[in-house]
Amino acid sequence: MNSDVRRYVIVGNGFAGTTAAEQLRKHDPACEITLFGDEPYTLYNRISLPPMLRRQIPEAKVMIRDVAWHENNRIDLHLKTHVECIVPQERVVQVDGTSYAYDALLLATGGRPAPIGKPGAQDAGNLFPFQYLDDTRAISQQIDRSRAGVAVGGSFIAYELAEAFASRGLETHWIMRGPRGLHRIIDEIAGELLHEAAAADGVVMHYGEEVLEFVRSNGEITKVRTSKGHEIEAQCYAYGFGLIMNTEICDGTGIETSKNGILCDDHLETNVKDVYAAGDVADFYDPILEVRYRMGTWNNAGAHGKVAAINMMGGSEKYHDVPEYSSLLFKGQTITQFGLGTDLRQDLEIARKVDREKKWYRALFFWEDRLVGGLMLGKGNRAGKRKYVEAIKAKQRFPKPEWHSLLDWTA
């Protein structure tokens, strides 16, 4: 074997891992790349799963890469494969008794849905998480057999479920423990606009309410009992409580982890040399926002994959993007986020502007007079977003009397 040929191993074939593999091949034509994925599928677009569930796009539009693409790029792809352990001292990962040597290793293992953990939930035939392509298929088939659906949780995942149920004509209930939907990132005023959009789509909202138990018959749930004494009958139930990060691969290796994921620096390198983390599982330090966090967005995963690949090849690239996210909120609203929000730092100061007639909401977040993030609700209310993002990247400071004038920046 030619000792000059670099060997790269990537665990996780989602957007971060596959992007890294693509970049490695692009910049190092001679290298060896081994890519492991635990699902039976090549890369697919997770942000296309909600429109697929709403039947706005076919499944074929969700798939991004096929086996032939990996073969053409000489990426040694292993699907339905569980990587058993990493041995950093020997620079190998072990799979089914076989050792795969690496010069640089990328862990892009993502996360798995947190369980609902309520009486009656275990192995219920019509209760689903919503994370994978197989989940989407199963929920869609159940919707076809249903008159009513219940979404549980205050997260974006639960919102997407409620939206899908409503868009496909089900009587829809959205149950959440918090005081409003998406309460970790939006305040009471923005929550009212979200409520209006949900109500306009016919969604019945249940705030400050928890599932006590799922009542079953013949292996399927027939109704849910809540902490406020409600009993809701439905045929389709699904939930979103966030993710549990897949960090078990690091156990006993010396690779440091946290409750949020795999710890890494602003180059996405862990405390173990030549071992990197990217995507949802990376608990990384952001040199622009000057804070450590984990970001589970599609764009962030792709950006991580590119940065990790450069550094795996011996570069010295820092993560330098400002995280962004945009989505519809039912048929009548949109949401756009960028940078930091109050879910990541509770000490941020906020400037707000609300136009009730247009159903627009705009909030900018400041930390020590620096603009560090923003949140916008309302169709057409995205003016100035690029300018805000550039100001965040430049670490610009603004005197407090100027904050409200920033709310009127135009693109």
Image (cartoon, helix red, strand yellow):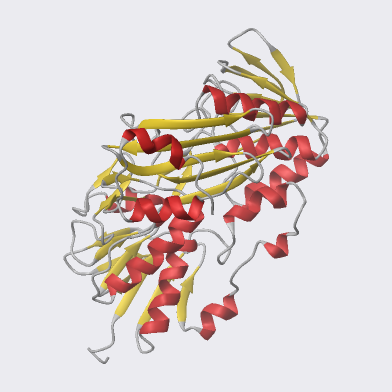
Q: Is residue 384 above or below residue 92?
A: above
Q: Toward which corner of the image does residue 151 lie, by quadrant? A: top right
* Residue at x 53%, y 85% (from the top left corner): 72
Give the farthest residue toward the bottom.
2
Residue 351 place in picture, x, y as percent: 43, 32
Q: Nearer the viewer, residue 210 or 404?
A: 404
Foreground pick, 335 / 258 = 335
Image point 70% across, 37% down: which residue?
Answer: 163
- Residue extending furthest toward the top: 229
Report the number of numbered marks.
Answer: 0
Relative placement, left or right, of 258 versus 237 is left
Pinpoint residue 54: horizontal percent, then vertical percent: 74, 46
378 to the left or right of 388:
right
| Residue 79 appears in view | yes
Spot occupied by residue 408 in the image (x, y as percentages of width and height)? 51, 42
Relative to 88, residue 127 above or below: above
Quadrant including the C terminus: bottom right
Q: Residue 130 sits in which quadrant?
A: top right
Residue at the location (75% across, 59% down)?
58
Q: Residue at x 26, y 92 (%)?
A: 2
Going by the image, does 58 lie left or right of 189? right
Q: Is 369 in front, or is 164? A: 369
